[in-house]
Amino acid sequence: MSRVSASRLRRREWMLSVVIAGFVLGSTSNDSQAQGDPPPHRAVVGFTACVGCHGRSRDGKGGDDLPLPSPSGDWILDNEVLTWARKDKHHQAYAVLFNKRSVDMGRLMNIKAVHRDRRCLSCHTGYPRALMPADDQHRVNETWHRKTDVSFGITCEGCHGPGGDLASKDSDRDGWFRLHLPPLNPKRPWRFLDPKVKWEQHGYFDVRTPSNKARLCGTCHIGDVSQGRVVTHEMYAAGHPPLPGFEIATFVAQMPTHWRSVAGKSDGTAGKSRSEFLAKTADPFFSPDTFRLDSLHRTQSMLVGALVSLAQSLELTAGLSQRATGGSAWPELAQFECYACHHDLRVPAWRQRRVNPAGVPGRPVLREWATVLARVALVQPKQRDQFDAQWKQVRDVLAKTPFGNRSELARTTMATAAWLTTQAKQLERRPLTREGGRRVLLDIARAGVVGGFDYESSRQLVWACEVVFDELGKGDAKELKALREAGHVLVFPQRPVQPVAKGLFEPRQGPSKTVEIDLSKLLPPIGNFDPAEVTRAFQAVETAIKAWPPVKSASR
C-alpha cells in the first residue's frame, strides 16, 4: 500500500471512529435501560472511539498520516492506541484464552469454553465483572462474548474506566468519555479536575497517583475477590502460568508506556503546557508541597507500589479466607508460598540454612515476595517497628495452626493491609530527592546483603535496584551488570510470536498466536536458584554506593 493510500485509509478510519463515538454516546443510556435493571457501572464506549485522537502515526520527522491538527496540542502522544496494539501484551490478553495451554486447562477443569468463562474474562478483558452476565457455570452468553472490545483484551477502558453515561439525566452522571473530548468546558476543564471528582462523578480511574495506579494494576496482577479476579491453586495445577511477583515501576516500563508523565510533558505550547497544568490542577498530588519536577518519580512509584502490593495481597488472603470464590475453598493454596512445597529435595540446601519465615517448621507461609520491598519503603525506624509488630500478628496466626484460624487470619491481614495503605498514601505525598534515592538504593542493597530470600523476593530487590539505578543516571554501572547476572534473577523469558490479526480492527475469532511465557526457560533458574550469588552481588552494590560523591537536587 502506498503512503498516500495508507494516509487516506487512516483518514477514513478516523472519520469512522468519530461516527462510532457519536453513535455510542447517543445510545449508551438507552441500551442500559433496555437491559432491565440499571447497571451498577457505566457502559463501555469501546476503544474504536479513541482512535481519532489517539491513533495517529508519526514518523518522527514531521510526517503525519492525519493532516488535521491534534486537538490536544502536544499534551498527549496521539499514538497511544497504536503503541497498545503493536507492543502491549494487554492487547493479547483475550487471545491467549484460545491457545493450547488454555484449552488444556479448560479440559482439566471441566470448562468447555475458557474464552467464555467469567473467572477468566475478569482479568483477560477490560470489562467490569458487573457488565458480564453469566450462568451458574460462569459462562457469559455467546452474544456478549463476541463484542469487539472483548476480542481485543484489555482495551482503553479496562484501565481508564468505562466511559459511558449512567442511565440518568443528571449532569454529574455524564461519563468521562464525553467530558474529555474537545472542545472542553472552559468553566470546568477536564484536565484540571480533581481525580476524586473524575472518579466519583464521571467514572474515570486515577492512573496518576502512585497508590491508585498500583492498586488498579494489582487487581489483576495480584488479585481482587470483589472483582472476581482470582487465580486459584486449581488453575495453577491445570496449567496457568505462575503469577510473578509484581513490581509496578518495572511492569509499567515493560508494557511499554504509551504516555508521557507530567514531568516528561512539553512546556512549550501556549495553553497546553506542563506549567499551566501544575498551576491550575485541582489534583492534590501535583501541589507544590507534594510534586517536584526533579523528584525521583519512578522510584517513588516503586516504593508506594510495594506497600500497596502487600496490602492487596493481604486483602486477597482475607477475602479468600472468608468466602469461597469460583468454587475454591479455604485454604486457597495459591496464597501460600509455592516453592516452599514445589522444590527439589537437596541436602544441604539454602532453605535449611536460612531463618524459618514461618517460625514453626513445616507451617505454610504466605507468599514472601510482597514483604521484602515493603519493608524498604518504610524508611523510618518507628515505621519498621510498627510493621514488624503487625506482621508478627499475621505470622503468629499462621504458626498456631496450619493455614491459620480463618476469622483471626482475616482480622490480622485486613488490619495490616489498612495500615500499609495509610503508609502508602503518606509516602506518595513526600517528594523523593536524589539523595533520598541513594538512601533507598543503599537500603535495598543492605536487604540483599542480609540475604536468605527466595527467588521471587530476590528478583523484587533486583528490579527495584534497576529502577533506582536508571533514575539516578547510573543504569550502566558495573555493579548493576553483576547484579543482573547473579543467579539469573531477572529471567522472565517469553516466546516472541506475532499475533495473527492482520489489522487493528480485525475481530479475533478462533486460535491466535500470542507472546507467551516459556515455562521451560522460566522454571529451571527458579529450581537452581542459590541466594548466595545474589548476596555477593548486593555486597558489591553496597560498597559502590558508599563511595559515590554527594548529590544535589535542583529546584522545582
Image (cartoon, grey):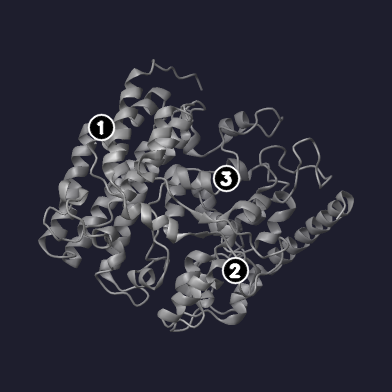
Structural distance between the alpha carbons of marks 2 and 3: 22 Å
Local SS, label 2 = helix
Disc 1 crowd, CA 10 A, few/some/many (<14, 14-19, 20+)? few
Give coordinates of residue 448: x percent, y percent. Answer: 28, 37
Whether residue 107 is visible to the viewer of this picture, yes or no, is yes
Residue drawn at (31%, 58%) of the image: 315
User: What residue is pinned by disc 2?
Assistant: 150
Q: In the image, which disc is placed on residue 552? A: none
Whether residue 291 is visible to the viewer of this picture, yes or no, is no
Q: Nearer the viewer, mark 3 or mark 1?
A: 3
Circles 2 and 3: CB distance less than 8 Å?
A: no
User: What residue is pinned by disc 1?
Assistant: 380
Q: Give whichever of discs 2 and 3 has the lower sequence position.
A: 2
In which quarter of the view is residue 142 placed?
bottom right
Residue drawn at (81%, 40%) of the image: 63
Give coordinates of residue 513: x percent, y percent. Answer: 60, 66
Q: Give whichever of discs 3 and 1 has the lower sequence position.
A: 3
Task: From this view, report whether residue 450 is shown above or below residue 251.
Answer: above
**Left/right of residue 293 with respect to residue 273 in the rendered view:** left
Disc 2 crowd, CA 10 A, few/some/many (<14, 14-19, 20+)? many
**Left/right of residue 41 with respect to residue 243 in the rendered view:** right
Local SS, label 3 = loop
Residue drawn at (40%, 59%) of the image: 243
Structural distance between the alpha carbons of marks 1 and 2: 45 Å
User: What residue is pinned by disc 3?
Assistant: 257
Give coordinates of residue 453: x percent, y percent. Answer: 26, 45
Give coordinates of residue 47: x percent, y percent. Answer: 66, 60
Q: Give whichever of discs 1 and 2 has the lower sequence position.
A: 2
